[in-house]
Amino acid sequence: MPPSPDDTGRSKLDPQIEKLIGSPQDRLRLLQALLGAPACRQLGIYPLPEGFKLSVVIPVFNEKQWIRELVGRVQAVPIPKEILIVDDCSTDGTPDILRELAGDTIRVFFQERNQGKGAALREGFRHVTGNVVLVQDADLEYDPAEYPRLIQPIIENRADVVYGSRFIGESHRVLYFWHYVANRALTALSNFFTNLNLTDMETCYKVFRREVLAELQLKSNRFGFEPEITAKIAKKRQPAWRVYEIPISYSGRTYEEGKKIGLKDAFVALYCVIRFWLMD
């Protein structure tokens, strides 16, 4: 028989459960006892190194509708973290919301003029202090609940860079066929030049050891950031950086819901794939 709720709707067992799992270490031990350590690893349940901190960098442009909820979802992830938000000269009221959200663990930076995603990320990267850096878009297309699995290969010293792929096995919202074709074509062209076997070069979710970013000189201001950083990661030698892909879910937006990337950006990305491999 299930435990009966009290007048507030909470189970009478809650205090006992809370006592059992009073700390992250206690929760981990309980889950490992119930599920086994191998199953926990597969689910992204594992111990973090002492003193670990994740830096989440969020470039923002006109995301008044979503930014508050997105930041709440990021904060809810049970990983020690700092959140760095870079507003790219929004005009829809987003800056006012960001000023409200700013605090001890949320730092907000304002660009003086609109420059694009790449420029906003460079500004954010300059201020990170965490061991691992993760890029998060400001909408709700990507789910922060997947952070534990995304950083796991780095925590376990199997990777230096992790890409979250929308095309290898997780659920996704069904949307634009030609966007899918363009993404796969750009990824294939990038792979041709870099000799990597990525399935989703254009993904938002890119995760790095902080030392990786410290060695990169990034230049792209807009969506050329994706092929540029991929090319420069692939060029690293002696030793090469280890790159992993992790399957992620994806809830894409329509243009009516605020999607910004378009055909022009696809041609810019095509140019950047070739430019940053051959000339930079």
Image (cartoon, rainbow, N blue to C red):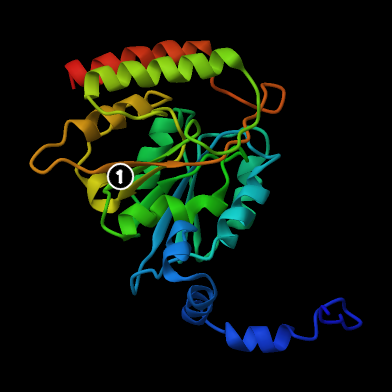
Element under label 1? Answer: strand
Q: Which residue of the protein is positioned furthest toward the left in this rendering?
A: 238
Tell me the residue that label 1 is attached to: 161
Between 60 and 100, the one lying in front of the other is 60
Q: Choose top left, top right, bottom left or bottom right for residue 268.
A: top left
Q: Position of residue 69 (x, y in %)?
A: 67, 50
Which residue is painted at 62% across and 25% down in the image? 259
Which image quadrant: the C terminus? top left
Q: Position of residue 230 (x, y in %)?
A: 30, 30
Q: Choose top left, top right, bottom left or bottom right for residue 16.
A: bottom right
Residue 193 seen anywhere in this rendered image of the structure: yes
Count of numbered circles on the image: 1
Q: Which residue of the protein is positioned furthest toward the right in this rendering?
A: 7
Which residue is painted at 46% across and 20% down in the image? 183
Between 87 and 68, the one lying in front of the other is 68
Q: Is residue 189 left or right of residue 110?
A: left
Residue 219 seen anywhere in this rendered image of the structure: no
Between 78 and 199, the one lying in front of the other is 199
Q: Position of residue 100 (x, y in %)?
A: 64, 56
Is 7 situated above or below 275? below
Q: Is residue 12 left or right of residue 244?
A: right
Is 184 situated above or below 70? above
Q: Residues within 10 Å of mark 1 (few under 14, many from 20)?
A: many
Q: Which residue of the protein is positioned furthest toward the front in this rendering?
A: 1
Is 266 situated above or below 239? above
Q: Is residue 186 left or right of residue 63?
A: left
Q: What kind of residue is marked 1?
A: Val
Which residue is painted at 42% across and 64% down in the image? 38
